[in-house]
Image (cartoon, helix red, strand yellow):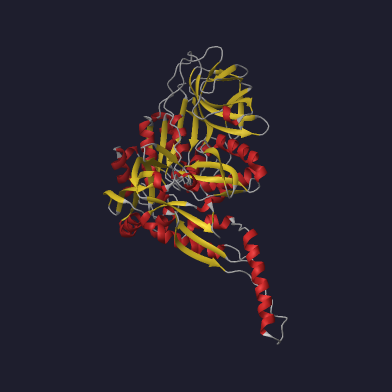
Amino acid sequence: MQHIRNFCIIAHIDHGKSTLADRLLERTGTIQVTEGQMLDDMDLEKERGITIKSHAIQMRYPRGGETFTLNLIDTPGHVDFSYEVSRSIAACEGCLLVVDATQGVQAQTISNLYMAIEHDLEIIPVLNKCDMINAMPEEVEDEIIELLGCKREEILRCSAKTGEGVDAILDAIVDKIPAPKGDPEAPLQALIFDSVFNPFRGIIAYFKIENGSIRGGEDVLFVNTGKQYKADEVGVLKMDLSPRQSLGCGDVGYIVSGIKTATEVKVGDTITSAANPCAQAIEGFEEVKPMVFAGVYPIETEDFEQLRASLEKLQLNDASLTFQPESSVALGFGFRCGFLGLLHMEIIQERLDREFNMNVITTVPNVSYHVFDKHNEMHEVHNPAGMPDPVEIEHIEEPYIRASVITRTDYIGAIMKLCLSKRGELIKQEYVSGDRVELHYDMPLAEIVIDFYDKLKSISKGYASFDYHAIGMRPSRLVKLDILLNGEPVDALSTLTHVDNSVTFGRRMCERLKELLPRQQFDIAIQAAIGAKIIARETVKQVRKDVTAKCYGGDVSRKRKLLEKQKRGKKRMKEIGNVQVPQKAFLAVLKLD
């Protein structure tokens, strides 16, 4: 145990975590790095250049006649994947806090750091990209000292691209990060921090052993689900799975036990021995709190069960996804899914398409509200269709967040204007360093789930960083805005919006739908309504054939007769025709500006 070190790498998005992980793997001779980002093996990760999943890998590092086992967990940096980071931190004793020397401390750096401090991790500050022309090592070191309260000589300078300074990092990991604490003689107690689905071998769970040891072939018990299995194979995580006879206290590894049902493995569960179980499960694992909800429906109704199976398999690999069945008048049967943010929603949609070949329609994302009726009973409403009659509502409460935006002083005015337009209220403003300022706002979550992040990036030319956490519910004046097509409400386009924004929002929705809906053989009336009151209307004109073309001269009554006949046909067609709303239209609502 004295030769084991478990650590993770945390940083803001694009600060060079995965590149540094590659250099560590290369320097310890674990793998030959042939192309960039060896750990980011998902196609989506390579295309977008971001880490989506945290990846665990074991390295051997010989030093001074001893060989140390280093278990590295590389984590994502985007705010939408912070749950992955929290799970990685739960399985470690220390972390490398990587800060980009060209950009300095960003919002996600601070939020991930607080998460690590809460778990009492040993923190090693690393300054990356020191070889860049525009690096500002001294200024950024000042920021790190102010943030951590460490000494200047404790900050390690490196360049993950060139490999400079990587040996000093490996030495610091061995010297500063404590060995895992635990009792090798106690009953087995292991924390599951991740799992993947393998079509041939069933579910493979990744775990960290807190106490005791595990051998291949022994019977194990999953504490929370109460299920018993045989450990067919245990081993450690290299680039591929590497089987071992047994794993001891402090080790990070995997278990294959032929589990086929996705719901039987829960991240955060405890594995123990069936013959000699531990007294209690491991604590300190938080439940995921989804921020954004959206309906996910199969395009073909008969694919409903296949979509359920796909979501269950995806949930194994991404424990922050939550879902429950629901039905819609327009779209049939589907699932109400909870995501951590818009990027997370987009990634899940992409993965459903690529990994499971599921073509789905996603409704407008929204958040959950607390609706209080006249008898002061509270109903939790996830989508506008579940809203009670306005007459019965006493008041509505919506979730609020505390947002932290770190930006250069040049963009303060534009960012404040954006936050105010989203009903934000300034709590405090503090200067992080010379020309960088941190703004704290209280804002309704509903205002930021659609396009806030994109707008923030564009007005700050990519310099502002953003992070948030939930602070509870507050009363608000909200109304349900319905979109009607030829008098029929389309429940997938309904939204809950603030009274002050409702008229302009309704008008913009109608204008956008007019551009997107294909023309039919009859007029389509697009209306925005609050209750029975219509607040905006647009009409998609019908496609008409020139039925009078064959009349050359002759009596005008003949032309009129043909036009009347056409008019009757159009009227009959309107009664039986229905309007198909393309997926583009659902997505367009998200990008109204």
Residue farthest toward the bottom in the current orientation of the protein: 553
Foreground pick, 310 / 543: 543
254 w.r.t. 412: above or below: above
Q: Is residue 431 visible?
A: no
Q: In which quarter of the image is residue 203?
A: top right
Q: Is residue 406 left or right of residue 273?
A: left
In the foreground, 530 or 211: 530
Question: Which quadrant, please, contains the C terminus?
Answer: bottom left
Number of numbered discs on residues:
0
Rendering coords of residue 171 (x, y %):
43, 33
In the rendering, at what x and y percent does residue 166 appear?
Answer: 45, 40
Where 238 sits versus 400, above or below?
above
Does residue 379 appear in the picture of this structure?
A: yes
Task: Decide which of 167, 328 is in the foreground and name it.
Answer: 328
Q: Where in the figure is residue 147, as x and y percent of width and height?
A: 31, 41
- Asked whether, in this view, residue 124 is left or right of residue 524, the answer is left
Q: Residue 463's x, y, as percent?
A: 39, 55
User: Of 459 and 144, which appears nearest the observer?
Assistant: 459
Q: Looking at the picture, does residue 239 appear above or below residue 293?
A: above
Decide if residue 544 is on the left or right side of residue 393.
Answer: right
The image quarter containing residue 325 is top right
Identify the residue at image location x=43%, y=24%.
Answer: 283
The residue located at (41%, 31%) in the rendering is: 94
Left or right side of 283 for 319: right
